[in-house]
Image (cartoon, rainbow, N blue to C red):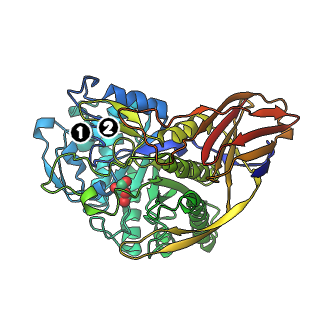
C-alpha cells in the first residue's frame, strides 16, 4: 500500500499540554500495595517506595498522576489515610470487594509524586460523601496553616502545603456500579457546590467535572449537557473515559476503535460548546481524558475483578498486553495528540499491575508491558505543536463491538485510514512523526511532504512490531516486544520516505 501526507509547520492543531501525558494510581488490586509501594522489597527506599518501579515510571514519562480512584474514591474517607499509620482504620472497599489497610494515603502519595517527578491530580469522593469532605481535603492539602485541617497536616509531619492544583469532582458518577451514583441533575448540583467551596479555599485550583464514563452509556450526551448546565462556571475541565476492546478477536475493528475516541472527543467538544452558546459565553471547556487504555480480558468476568474473602491487594485486573494491544493503544495516543487543542489532560489507566504499562512480582522484579513503549515515546516526542496533517491513505470499514452491561452493542467505524498519523513540531525545529500501519498484511510506503521545514535529518527512527500479534512481555522475556530501529527512512528533497511493516507502530524523530 501507499500513503501520502502533507503538512506545514505553520498549520497547527494546538500545543500539547504536558498534562496530556498523565497516568493513574488507584487503590485497586496491586497498583499501590505491591506496585508503587512495597516496604521490605529489595529495592524499597526508606518510605517503602519500590525504586525499580520508580525507575520505570521515570522512563515511561508520565507528567501527572490521578489518585486515589477510580471507583475506589466513591467510598473513600480520606481521613482514614492520614496520621499515624498504626492508628489508621482497616476498611472494606466496596468498589473492588477487598480490604483496604490504609497504610498508604494522601501524604505518602504526595511524597511518591515528588520521588517520581510527577504532578498530583486528586479526586474527591462525591459518592458516599460530598462537598464538606472535599473542602476539608483541600484545606488539609493546600492551606498553609493556622486552621484545624492545615495544622493537622503539619502535625502529621508535612509542614509545607502540598499545593495540589488539579482536582477531579468525583469519578464516573453516571455509572450504577459506582457507590451512590447520581442522575445528571443530582451530580451537577453536588459537583457545583463542592467546586464552589473547594475554590473558595484555594482560588488557584483547577477542577474537572465528570463526563460520561463511556461513550456507550445510555445517558451519554444528555449527561454532559445537564452536568455542564450546573458546572460550566465552576469547572475548567469535563472528563472522558474509554477502554478499547477486542472481545470479538477482530483485529481490523480493534485497530479501528481509536477512531471512535476521535468521535467521542469531537462530540463532547460540540456539547460543551453548545452549553457555552446557550450562555453566549466565550469560555471553552477543556477536556480531561482521565481514564483511557485497552481493557477487556479482565473486565467482564466477575472472577477476574473480584476475589472472595475480602483480601488485601489481590491480583485483579492484571491485563497482560499483547503486540496487538500496543497497536490499538498507539492509535489512542495519536487520537489524543491530534486533539491537543481541546484535550489538555489525559491519564493512562493505570500505572502498575492494574491494566498497566508496568508489571511487578510482589517480592520480585518489575518489567515493561507492550503498551509501555508507545506511551513512553509519546511522552518523549509528543511535546510541541501538533500539526494539521492531511493523510491520503486507503481505508476500510468495520463494525466495533462495544457491549454495554449485558446488552450487545456494535458501532460502525467507517473510512478507517490504514495509516493513522500524528506530527508534532518541537521548539527546537525538530519534527516527530507517530505512524500506525493498520494493515495487518501489507507494507505501507509513506511519503511525507515537509517542504516548509528547511533541512531535516533523521534523528531516531523506531518500529514496534512482532510476527506474532499475540506476543507479550513477561518476567522471563521482558523485551520480547520492544522498539527496534526502523531502517530505510530517507529525507530527500523536502520529502520523508519510509516503509512501514504490516501491523506496526513507528516513531520517526527528525532534527
Ligand atoms: O480503571 C479501572 C476502573 O475503571 C476505575 O476504577 C473506574 O473509574 C473505571 O470504571
Q: Quadrant of the C terminus?
A: top right
Point out which mark residue 104 bears.
1
Residue assigned mark 2: 109
For image coordinates 37% across by 49% down, the residue present is 319
Cα separation, mark 2 vs mark 1, equals 7 Å
Residue 345 position (above or below residue 261): above
In which quadrant of the rendered view does residue 155 lie?
A: top left
- Can you tell me which quadrant of the image ligand 1 is in? bottom left
Give the left or right position of residue 156, taking residue 216 as reference.
left
Residue at left offset 30%, top offset 62%: 301
Closest to the observer: 314 or 180? 314
Task: Kindly check if marks 2 and 1 are in contact, taking CB atoms under 8 A apart as contact.
Answer: yes
Q: Earlier in the sequence, mark 2 or mark 1?
A: 1
The image position of residue 166, as x and y in percent, is 44, 47
Residue 115 point in image, percent of width and height: 38, 28
Residue 285 visible in image = no
Which structural element holds mark 1? loop
Name the residue located 27 percent from the left edge and 68 percent from the top edge: 180
Q: Residues within 10 Å of mark 1 (few under 14, many from 20)?
A: some
Q: In this rendering, does residue 489 appear at all?
A: yes
Of 79 and 254, the residue lying toward us = 254
In this rendering, is residue 228 above or below 118?
below
Q: Quadrant of residue 8?
A: top right
Q: Is the residue marked 2 within 8 Å of ligand 1, measured from its CB?
A: no
Amino acid at each position: 500500500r501507499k500513503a501520502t501526507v502533507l503538512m506545514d509547520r505553520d498549520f497547527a492543531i494546538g500545543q500539547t499540554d504536558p498534562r496530556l501525558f498523565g497516568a493513574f494510581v488507584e487503590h485497586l488490586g496491586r497498583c499501590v500495595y505491591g506496585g508503587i509501594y512495597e516496604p521490605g522489597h529489595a529495592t524499597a527506599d526508606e518510605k517503602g517506595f519500590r525504586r525499580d518501579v520508580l525507575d520505570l515510571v521515570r522512563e515511561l514519562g508520565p507528567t501527572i498522576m490521578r489518585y486515589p480512584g477510580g471507583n475506589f474514591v466513591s467510598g473513600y474517607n480520606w481521613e482514614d489515610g492520614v496520621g499515624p499509620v498504626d492508628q489508621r482504620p482497616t476498611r472494606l472497599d466496596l468498589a473492588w470487594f477487598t480490604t483496604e489497610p490504609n497504610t498508604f494515603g494522601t501524604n505518602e502519595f504526595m511524597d511518591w509524586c515528588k520521588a517520581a517527578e510527577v504532578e498530583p491530580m486528586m479526586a474527591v469522593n462525591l459518592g458516599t460523601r460530598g462537598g464538606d469532605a472535599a473542602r476539608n481535603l483541600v484545606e488539609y492539602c493546600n492551606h498553609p496553616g493556622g486552621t484545624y485541617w492545615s495544622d493537622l497536616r503539619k502535625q502529621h509531619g508535612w509542614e509545607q502545603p502540598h499545593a495540589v492544583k488539579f482536582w477531579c469532582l468525583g469519578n464516573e458518577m453516571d455509572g450504577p456500579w459506582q457507590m451512590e451514583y447520581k442522575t445528571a441533575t443530582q451530580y451537577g448540583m453536588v459537583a457545583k457546590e463542592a467546586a464552589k467551596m473547594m475554590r473558595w479555599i484555594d482560588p488557584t485550583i483547577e477542577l474537572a467535572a465528570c463526563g460520561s464514563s463511556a461513550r456507550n452509556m445510555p445517558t451519554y450526551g444528555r449527561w454532559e449537557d445537564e452536568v455542564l448546565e450546573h458546572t460550566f462556571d465552576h469547572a475548567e475541565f469535563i472528563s472522558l473515559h474509554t477502554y478499547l476492546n477486542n472481545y470479538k478477536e477482530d483485529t481490523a475493528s480493534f485497530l479501528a476503535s481509536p477512531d471512535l475516541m476521535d468521535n467521542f472527543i469531537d462530540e463532547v467538544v460540540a456539547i460543551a460548546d453548545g452549553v457555552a452558546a446557550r450562555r453566549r459565553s466565550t469560555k471553552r471547556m477543556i477536556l480531561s481524558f482521565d481514564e483511557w487504555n485497552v481493557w477487556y480480558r479482565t473486565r467482564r468476568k466477575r472472577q477476574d475483578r473480584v476475589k472472595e474473602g475480602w483480601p488485601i491487594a489481590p491480583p485483579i485486573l492484571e491485563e497482560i498486553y499483547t503486540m496487538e494491544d500496543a497497536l490499538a493503544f498507539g492509535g489512542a495516543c495519536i487520537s489524543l495528540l491530534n486533539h491537543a487543542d481541546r484535550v489538555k489532560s489525559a491519564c493512562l489507566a493505570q500505572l502498575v499491575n492494574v491494566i498497566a504499562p508496568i508489571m511487578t512480582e510482589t517480592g520480585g522484579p518489575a518489567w515493561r508491558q507492550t503498551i509501555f513503549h508507545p506511551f513512553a515515546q509519546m511522552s518523549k516526542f509528543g511535546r510541541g505543536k501538533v500539526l494539521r496533517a492531511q493523510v491520503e491513505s486507503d481505508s476500510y470499514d468495520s463494525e466495533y463491538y462495544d457491549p454495554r452491561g449485558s446488552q450487545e452493542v456494535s458501532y460502525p467505524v467507517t473510512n478507517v485510514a490504514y495509516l493513522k498519523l500524528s506530527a508534532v513540531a518541537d521548539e527546537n525545529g525538530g519534527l516527530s512523526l507517530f505512524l500506525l500501519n493498520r494493515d495487518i498484511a501489507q507494507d505501507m510506503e509513506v511519503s511525507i511532504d515537509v517542504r516548509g521545514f528547511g533541512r531535516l535529518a533523521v534523528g531516531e527512527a523506531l518500529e514496534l512490531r512482532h510476527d506474532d500479534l499475540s506476543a507479550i512481555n513477561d518476567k522471563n522475556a521482558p523485551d520480547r516486544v520492544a522498539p527496534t530501529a526502523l531502517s530505510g527512512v530517507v529525507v530527500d528533497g523536502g520529502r520523508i520516505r519510509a516503509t512501514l511493516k504490516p501491523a506496526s507502530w513507528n516513531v520517526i524523530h527528525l532534527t
